[in-house]
Image: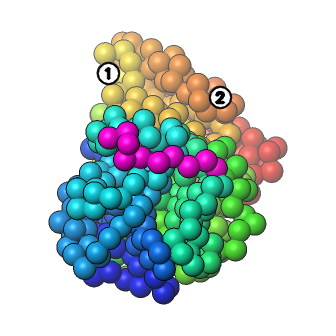
Amino acid sequence: MKPMKIKDGVVKLGAVHFERRLFDSLIPLPAGTSYNAYLVEGSEKVALIDTVDPMKLDVLMEQLNDVPKIDYVVSNHSEQDHSGSIPFVLEKYPEAKVICTPKAKTFLMDLLHIPEDKINTVEDNERISLGGKTLRFIHAPWVHWPETMFTYLEEDSIIFTCDFLGSHLATSELFAEDECLVYNSAKRYYAEIMMPFRNFIEKNLDKIKNLKIDYIAPSHGPVYNKPQFIFDAYNSWVYDDPKNIVVIPYITMHGSVKAMVDYLTAVLSQKGVVVKPFDLTVTDLGELAMSLVDAATIVVGTPTVLAGAHPQVIYATYLANALKPKTKFLSIIGSYSWGGKAVDQLSSMITNLKVEVIPPVFIKGLPKEADFKLLDELADTIVEKHKETNIK
């Protein structure tokens, strides 16, 4: 990857990781990812904003071959996919100082063993002049770590947001030209990483809303040369009410739960509800997370394993609880034979969700006519709840 010019004195560096398919040993990456760094050259000083994952260190160092000096290495976020190459940059430019928030200083010292005397901390809205280019540092805690900040290049109206507003998308394009493709990748990124911090995101969107922003330069995915596109998407994901959607993550072992899910899906669909069932044996959990961004209701479907819920259903419930979507209602359906503790087990795992729990439908064995009538009643209740809360 060659350096790409955004404006005079501002270039995008970094690496595209086309082949990476798992992030943090947890998050699927169907479209790969990128690690973006940015070089800002003033008439007096030069700043490197963020670095790359050490797996792609060689790409960054090659890009820096013709850069004679770096005065500042700005660390917007201490996580290693952005900060992990800082020690190697400091080795090449021993005169450089790391710029970060006070909280990030400790993180960088602990995670990367950067010496304390190499780090300068900045307060919220503090500025550094590079000569004709001024960097303003905006603290943005919990987007998505407690030490995060944004860097705003005042003269060029560019905001470097690190993870915020980014997308796990491997692309060689500088700007977000294919907005449909970028939208889906950015939504997945929001769902998997940013959604648990929705309340903090609201505050930080407010914090930058009055800035003149011509470009948004995140640390994953393309640069936004039409910033309103991603602002509109985030405003929808963060502020809009959930939609008339029911998400059903489920597991079936011998067909009973599948029969219940298929029946409930058909009944709800006939009543005008959008239903998204996810068989957890084959589901991309990122797709499940994306569906939770908009869903008004979750119905968890499980068989029993050793009298409890299936382990994959337990994990999916844990995931939904951790992601804290805007969902308003939740219910549980399932089947048991000789032990039925799954409902109590799953109900105890949703403490983060501000939901009304609709009485579950948990049956013995293969569903019978009476059981399907209970599913009819569940569908009617969901439809009525959506109407009562003006969900459309």
Q: Which quadrant of the structure image shows residue 32?
A: bottom left
Per the image, label 2 sits on a secondary structure element best described as: strand
Q: Which quadrant of the structure image shows residue 66?
A: bottom left
Foreground pick, 91 / 30: 91
Bounds of the magenta segment: 115-124
Residue 94, can we see it?
A: yes
* Drawn side of residue 278 relative to residue 199, left or right: left
User: Can you identify the residue that label 2 sits on?
Assistant: 357
Give percent across and percent down for residue 329. Answer: 66, 37
- Above or below, 110 against 158 in this view is above
* Drawn side of residue 40 relative to residue 337, left or right: right
Foreground pick, 365 / 181: 181
Residues at circles 2 and 1 in contact by the CB criterion of under 8 Å: no
- At a point 43% along the width and 67% down the height, the residue shown is 47
> Magenta segment: does it hold 213?
no
Residue 108, can we see it?
A: no
- Above or below, 223 against 381 in this view is below
- Above or below, 225 against 320 in this view is below
Q: Quadrant of the N terminus?
A: bottom left
> Magenta segment: does it hold 119?
yes
* Drawn side of residue 235 relative to residue 50, left or right: right
- At a point 66% along the width and 33% down the height, the residue shown is 355
Amino acid marked by disc 1: Val
User: Can you identify the residue that label 1 sits on?
Assistant: 305
